[in-house]
Image (cartoon, coloured by chain):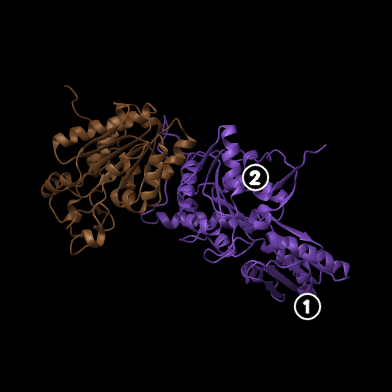
Chain colours: A purple, B brown
């Protein structure tokens, strides 16, 4: 019989991380991600791992920087304001080309906001929330199984492309419980870490830095990063399509919003409406080609988000030129999570 | 012929970018000699900070990771926890360690991380052009305290070594200077001792080095050295503040 667990999404992230070989976690308390540091503080010592509750989110992500510099699989987690604090260092790590995992179980905002489910951090996550013009890989799970699977994938992608990766979730996928089928990590071929610091030994000096002052050095580094982002767009986009083949209206949503949207799409189908769902799993790289393909035949798109329209910009840039993109979303806050019936009403309106 | 003086293995054979009379080059050499003393070069990972000290990797022939401003003790924590057999030190200035990085140094010290910290205190932000630092002396004019630092508005200079000495996690703490041959010899001794603490896994070690920044002080190197001895040593008392293992 297949082993099944019944766990919270935040715990699924931890289980996925440990199964992926992550033994170094550094974090700081903030709701609604606290299950993650609590789980790691309990489990990592049992496998000779390292857990530190740092003095701040800033210190935590800098510990990640240090561990990553030695080639260790390492991660931190936080929620929106804490992720904002980490942004300077994420920019450093993007430039230093250091792999790591950052989990954002986001809060509602701006400011201190609240702890409800929210997708208000989409721009921050996918547009390079820190300074200087960079991207990180951003994965958006919409189930507890995906919290586990995408955590594993994030570590592999981070190492293959030598860049930080982020899991972008919220209280819905973080704190909800669902069945999870654990499995060993995929047997991905990973590049040798010939850049990792180890002490020079009998070899050459290795330097991990983001300061490039020589003539042309920084420009070259930026072109290198740009090429990496182009390669990610070329090779690593992931998405789910549901009932899109004959759809006359395409609903699109990611993460927790996509769960509610999917229910609404099923309800619409039961009414005889030809509605499909396109759910991006990678938010960066954004699966633009999926939108281009589906909107060759389906010209009406309804984008649904738990914000006032952020992914909307990427959707508009990706669809066929003659496609008509509508939006429905509510900024996050207590009581703002839409019901499937509410979304079904929007589907009928835009069909 | 007998060889009486040579470049430490841990230093590269290059010229530094430091200004005439700057003490960074001297402190670099002392650190390199201490690394050589214990044969640490091959397993050392240095953590560079922000400021004139960022170019650590240009002068030391060791593996180096850069740290964001003030965060070197956190970065060093991550390095050491992930690679406990490596020798890990940070090299930080007073703006970096005593202002923006206050939280990181206090908590790394309090956890008793098995790392060594070299704290170069020259009472100013050197690289950015001589602004007021947390260690700027009362009355000292800088580009952001043009009327002189006042206790009323800016508070008194922070004595970091004394502050850290109070924390249980600190195993070794000393303040030294490199303005005279005598002080320099003692500085060398204390830096070696600090490194021995880590080599013998005896806990967090910290050395504050009073040093000169003639360019931003508007002095020639001789005057700057004299200022270290007269003004700085008067406020920042030299000595070994903590030596728990009595090494």
Q: Where B40 sits versus A220, above or below?
A: above
Q: CA distance from mark 1 to mark 2?
A: 39 Å
In the image, is B218 to the left or to the right of A131?
left
Q: Nearer the viewer, residue A235 or A109?
A: A109
Q: Nearer the viewer, residue A133 or A142?
A: A142
Total numbered labels: 2
Residue A152 is marked as 2
Image location of residue A108, percent across then percent down = 59, 64
State the residue at coordinates (39%, 49%): B103
Residue B69 is marked as none
Q: Where the N terminus of chain A falls, by quadrant? A: top right
User: Would you name the residue on which mark 1 appears?
Assistant: A349
Image location of residue A300, percent across then percent down = 75, 74
* Picture quadrant where residue A160 is located: top right
Q: Are marks 1 and 2 in contact (CB under 8 Å)?
A: no
Q: Is residue A207 visible?
A: no
| Residue farthest toward the top in the current orientation of the protein | B1
Image location of residue A169, percent across then percent down = 63, 56
In the image, is A324 to the left or to the right of B220?
right
Please, what secondary structure does the residue beneath circle 1 have? helix
Q: Nearer the viewer, residue A119 or A89?
A: A119
* Picture quadrant where residue A228 is located: bottom right
């Amino acid at each position: 019989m297949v082993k099944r667990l019944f766990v919270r999404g935040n715990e699924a992230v931890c289980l996925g991380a440990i199964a992926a070989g992550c033994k170094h976690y550094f974090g700081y308390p903030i709701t609604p991600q606290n299950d993650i540091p609590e789980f790691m503080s309990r489990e990592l010592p049992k496998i000779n791992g390292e857990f530190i509750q740092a003095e701040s989110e800033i210190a935590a992500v800098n510990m990640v920087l240090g561990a990553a510099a030695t080639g260790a699989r390492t991660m931190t987690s936080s929620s929106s304001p804490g992720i904002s604090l980490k942004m300077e260092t994420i920019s450093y790590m993007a430039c230093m080309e250091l792999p790591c995992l950052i989990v954002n179980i986001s809060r509602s905002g701006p400011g201190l906001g609240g702890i409800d489910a929210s997708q208000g951090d989409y721009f921050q996550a996918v547009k390079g929330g820190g300074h200087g013009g960079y991207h990180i890989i951003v994965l958006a799970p919409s189930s507890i199984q995906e919290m586990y699977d995408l955590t594993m994938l994030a570590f592999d992608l981070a190492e293959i492309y030598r860049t930080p990766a982020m899991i972008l979730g919220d209280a819905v996928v973080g704190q909800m419980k669902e069945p999870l089928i654990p499995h060993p990590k995929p047997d991905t071929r990973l590049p040798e870490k010939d850049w990792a610091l180890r002490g020079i030994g009998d070899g050459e000096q290795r330097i991990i830095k983001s300061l490039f002052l020589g003539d042309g050095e920084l420009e070259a580094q930026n072109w290198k990063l740009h090429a990496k982002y182009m390669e990610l767009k070329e090779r690593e986009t992931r998405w789910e399509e549901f009932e899109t083949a004959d759809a006359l209206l395409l609903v699109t949503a990611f993460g927790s919003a996509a769960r509610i949207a999917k229910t609404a799409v099923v309800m619409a189908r039961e009414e005889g409406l030809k509605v499909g769902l396109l759910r991006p799993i990678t938010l960066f790289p954004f699966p633009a080609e999926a939108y281009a393909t589906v909107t060759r035949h389906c010209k009406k798109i309804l984008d649904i988000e738990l914000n006032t329209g952020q992914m909307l910009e990427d959707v508009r840039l990706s669809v066929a030129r003659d496609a008509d993109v509508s939006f429905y979303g509510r900024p996050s806050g207590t009581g703002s999570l839409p019901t499937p019936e509410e979304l079904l009403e929007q589907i009928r309106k835009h069909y | 012929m007998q060889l009486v003086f040579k470049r430490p293995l841990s230093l590269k054979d290059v010229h530094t970018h430091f200004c005439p009379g700057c003490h960074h080059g001297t402190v670099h050499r002392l650190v390199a000699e201490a690394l050589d003393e214990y044969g640490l070069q091959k397993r050392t990972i240095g953590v560079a900070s922000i400021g004139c000290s960022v170019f650590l990797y240009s002068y030391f022939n060791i593996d180096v990771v850069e740290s964001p401003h003030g965060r070197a003790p956190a970065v060093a924590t991550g390095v050491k926890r992930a690679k406990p057999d490596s020798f890990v030190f940070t090299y930080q200035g007073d703006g970096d360690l005593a202002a923006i990085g206050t939280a990181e140094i206090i908590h790394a010290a309090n956890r008793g991380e098995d790392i060594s910290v070299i704290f170069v205190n020259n009472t100013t932000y050197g690289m950015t052009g001589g602004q007021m630092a947390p260690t700027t002396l009362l009355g000292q004019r800088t580009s952001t305290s043009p009327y002189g630092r006042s206790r009323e508005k800016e508070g008194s200079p922070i004595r970091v070594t004394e502050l850290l000495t109070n924390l249980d996690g600190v195993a070794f703490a000393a303040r030294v200077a490199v303005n005279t041959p005598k002080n320099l010899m003692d500085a060398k001794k204390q830096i070696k001792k600090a490194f021995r603490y880590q080599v013998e896994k005896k806990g967090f070690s910290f050395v504050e080095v009073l040093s000169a920044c003639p360019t931003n002080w508007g002095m020639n190197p001789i005057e700057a050295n004299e200022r270290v001895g007269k003004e700085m040593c008067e406020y920042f008392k030299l000595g070994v503040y903590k030596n728990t293992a009595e090494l």
